[in-house]
């Protein structure tokens, strides 16, 4: 049986929690305008234990769960499609833990040009709603290999998983099929970003720039795809990215002082 391949789009959140108004607008766009999938189950964690009745979406129940638990996960009838809104948990340590909006969908959708074009505009619009500084989209396996690694356990027995880069305040874990850079990263790259070839760089307005090394997410992890990523990383500045060969962290980091003062 062929392995199910999924596409994951992660929209990073700034410190704090998106307001209920912002989340309600986000859900309206995702399910009523974009129609990513038909929501059937939800919970504040990805167990999706509660059911949504067929028909008009019960936004009240979804927002009530978000307000009670400060997080919300919604799935289709199966786990092949889901959306999780997971703000960072500790307001006094704004960059110790990741906060993001994660959307998982079947990778087969990316074979359709119209879907790929819509994906760019939709992710950019959601980034604006929550003031996101960064979004990344690629195959789930590609995101896993760039953001996680195994290290020896402290007790000397076996290995444990850890992050390559804790979150965007510590730099970038790599380039993906699609990397949406917000103002802090656009400023960090400076003229290097503007000098990228036009076939892999697309300004999206309001300080957002998309960098896309190759046309399809299935090119991630291929010899040609990896070579294209390396060439763009070299042009943008290797110090901005995690070095997966030597396992060294980024040395150039985005300035996030203004971002940390944002109140949703």
Image (cartoon, rainbow, N blue to C red):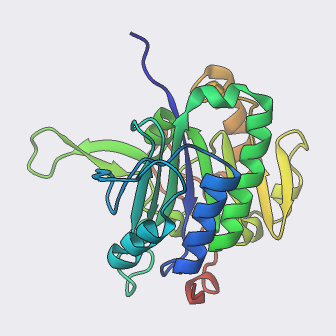
Q: Name which residue lies at 50% across and 79% down.
A: 15
Q: In the figure, is residue 35 to the left or right of 202?
A: left
Question: How many numbered markers are drawn?
Answer: 0
Picture quarter with the N terminus: top left
Residue 202 is situated, as x and y percent measured from the top left of the image, at: 85, 50
Q: In this view, does 192 lie to the left or right of 46?
A: right
Residue 177 is situated, as x and y percent measured from the top left of the image, at 66, 39
Determine the residue located farthest toward the top in the rendered image.
1
**108 up-or-down from 127: above or below:** above
Left or right of 182 in this view: 54: left
From what the image shows, is residue 5 above or below residue 189?
A: above
Q: Which residue is drawn at 82% across and 41% down?
A: 200
Quadrant location of the C terminus? Answer: bottom right
> Percent x, y for residue 199?
88, 39
30 or 223, which is in the foreground?
30
Q: Is residue 89 left or right of residue 120?
A: left
Residue 179 placed where, x, y %? 67, 50
Where on the picture, by quarter, is residue 183?
A: bottom right
For the residue pair 47 and 61, the one nearer the viewer reads as 61
């Amino acid at each position: 049986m062929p392995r199910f391949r999924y596409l994951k789009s992660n929209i990073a959140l700034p410190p704090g929690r998106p307001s209920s108004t912002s989340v309600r607008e986000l859900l309206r766009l995702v399910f009523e305008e974009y129609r990513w999938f038909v929501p059937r189950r939800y919970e504040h964690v990805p167990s999706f234990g509660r059911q949504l009745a067929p028909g008009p979406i019960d936004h009240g129940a979804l927002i009530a769960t978000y307000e009670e638990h400060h997080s919300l996960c919604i799935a289709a009838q199966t786990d092949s499609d889901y959306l999780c809104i997971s703000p960072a948990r500790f307001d006094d340590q704004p960059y110790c833990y990741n906060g993001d909006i994660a959307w998982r969908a079947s990778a087969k959708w990316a074979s359709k040009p119209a879907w790929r074009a819509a994906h760019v505009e939709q992710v950019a619009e959601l980034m604006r709603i929550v003031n996101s500084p960064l979004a990344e989209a690629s195959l789930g396996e590609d995101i896993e290999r760039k953001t996680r690694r195994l290290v020896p356990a402290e007790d000397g027995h076996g290995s444990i998983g850890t992050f390559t880069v804790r979150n965007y305040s510590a730099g970038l874990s790599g380039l993906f099929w699609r990397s949406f850079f917000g103002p802090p990263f656009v400023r960090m790259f400076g003229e290097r970003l503007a000098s990228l070839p036009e076939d892999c760089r697309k300004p999206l307005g309001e300080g957002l720039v998309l960098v896309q090394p190759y046309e399809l997410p299935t090119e991630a992890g291929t010899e040609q795809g990896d070579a294209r990523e390396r060439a763009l990383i070299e042009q943008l500045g290797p110090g901005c990215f995690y070095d997966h060969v030597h396992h060294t962290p980024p040395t150039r980091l985005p300035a996030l002082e203004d971002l940390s003062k944002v109140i949703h």
